[in-house]
Image: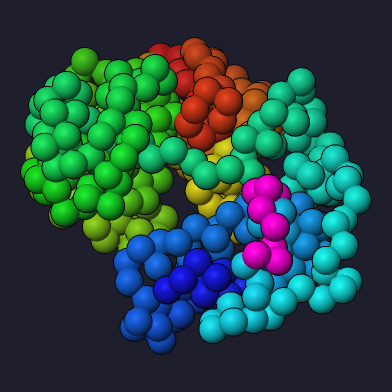
Amino acid sequence: MRPEARLAAAAEILDLYLAGEPAEKALTNWARRSRFAGSKDRAAVRDHVFDAIRQRRSAGWAGGAETGRGLVIGLLRLQGLDPAASLTGQGYALAPLREDEAAVADTAPELVALDCPDWLEEDLRSSLGADFSPVLQRLRGRADLFLRANLLRGTPTEAARALAEDGVETEPHPLCDTALRVLGGARALRNGQAYRDGLIEIQDASSQAVAAAVPLPASGRVLDYCAGGGGKALALAARKGGEIFVHDGNPRRMANIPERARRAAARLTPLEESDLEAGAYDLVVTDVPCSGSGAWRRQPDAKWRLDADGLAGILQLQRSILSRASDLVAPGGALAYMTCSLLDAENEAQQEQFLVERPGWRLEREIRLSPLQGGDGFFLAILRAERGA
């Protein structure tokens, strides 16, 4: 496909997305219909689509309309390119610019330029302070791809060497000793020997950093209560070298854990709700459902789907999970509360309310990581149960 045809395909997919179809589904269906599109074409179209979603407000402003065509026109302008050079009407290219589209838009208002939802401005400003604009600007771009060197299989240096042999170039990242940032060759990753042999896992650097900061007990049982696909549990298992129990409110999310654990040489044992024992775990990890605002680069549609009612429901769910998980912690044990959110309401406010309601607990440690540090935005609170509480 020529570059102009890729843009036309992106516009078509964006129209479906704007009409309510999930972006991933629209991309998958387009790829099935477009057997002529090679892997590079599919990757390029995907990049156009998600770049436009990340910059939905600013691209719509620059392109004159929040339509697939308008977002493509605006995205080209935001990239410093002349849309007229790509919208030629020739072959599979989009039709040439109309007179009204040829006019360049005025300078966008601040929230439009930052792609910030109006209703979240106050919460984001109060949560981010002086970093409000820099962080929102950072979230408009693509996220780096990070790998976690699996300590059960080798050192980070050995993992980097094996990746290089597979054609994947990496460099260490300061957020975590196990973090490797991919510099090139990402398409060779999943077919490479390093991935197949379990030397590495795909995991954001901030996610690795909070997993590394969790205080593992010298002995005793560890439970990942919101395990999902198992990323945190695998990181904990690599540190502990022993069994990690895993649970999720939706067990289907854990479907890939057995295969991932086998590849990583990790011992992860799934537990159903009925298997969980009150006061039986020396560490309970809760990477709770959240707004995902710290990871909007990776899941840009979450920014536009979220609304006030949705956030209120998330806050209630987080409080429910904290309450249930705390009952599982042994006296003197720890509860790790994590989100990939930037909002105080999901972070400090939740742990503060928990401590008010649970006088037998104390805050042991709190960490907030910003997208300005390279990875996703993340929050971690370590809550300790006093003995006999």
Q: In the displayed structure, would residue 255 be above or below residue 107?
A: below
Magenta segment, which residues?
78-85
Q: How is the image coloured?
A: rainbow
Q: Is residue 112 left or right of residue 162?
A: right
Residue at 74 percent across and 68 percent down: it is 70
Q: Position of residue 181 (x, y in %)?
A: 35, 31
Q: Position of residue 211 (x, y in %)?
A: 36, 28
Q: Is residue 286 magenta?
A: no
Would residue 313 be seen by someone viewing this image from the given angle?
A: no
Q: Which residue is more in the foreground, 166 or 389?
A: 166
Would residue 203 be seen by someone viewing this image from the given angle?
A: yes
Residue positioned most to the bottom: 33
Q: Which residue is more in the foreground, 182 or 257?
A: 182
Q: Is residue 325 left or right of residue 362?
A: left
Q: Quadrant of the N terminus?
A: bottom left
Q: Position of residue 303 (x, y in %)?
A: 66, 52
Q: Quadrant of residue 164?
A: top left
Mark count: 0
Q: Which residue is more in the foreground, 32 or 93?
A: 93
Q: In the displayed structure, would residue 74 be above or below residue 266?
A: below
Residue at 75 percent across and 42 percent down: it is 114
Q: Is residue 347 left or right of residue 225?
A: right
Residue at 16 percent across and 54 percent down: it is 191
Q: Position of residue 101 (x, y in %)?
A: 83, 69
Residue at 74 percent across and 47 percent down: it is 115
Q: Is residue 85 left or right of residue 199?
A: right
Q: Which residue is more in the foreground, 86 or 165?
A: 86
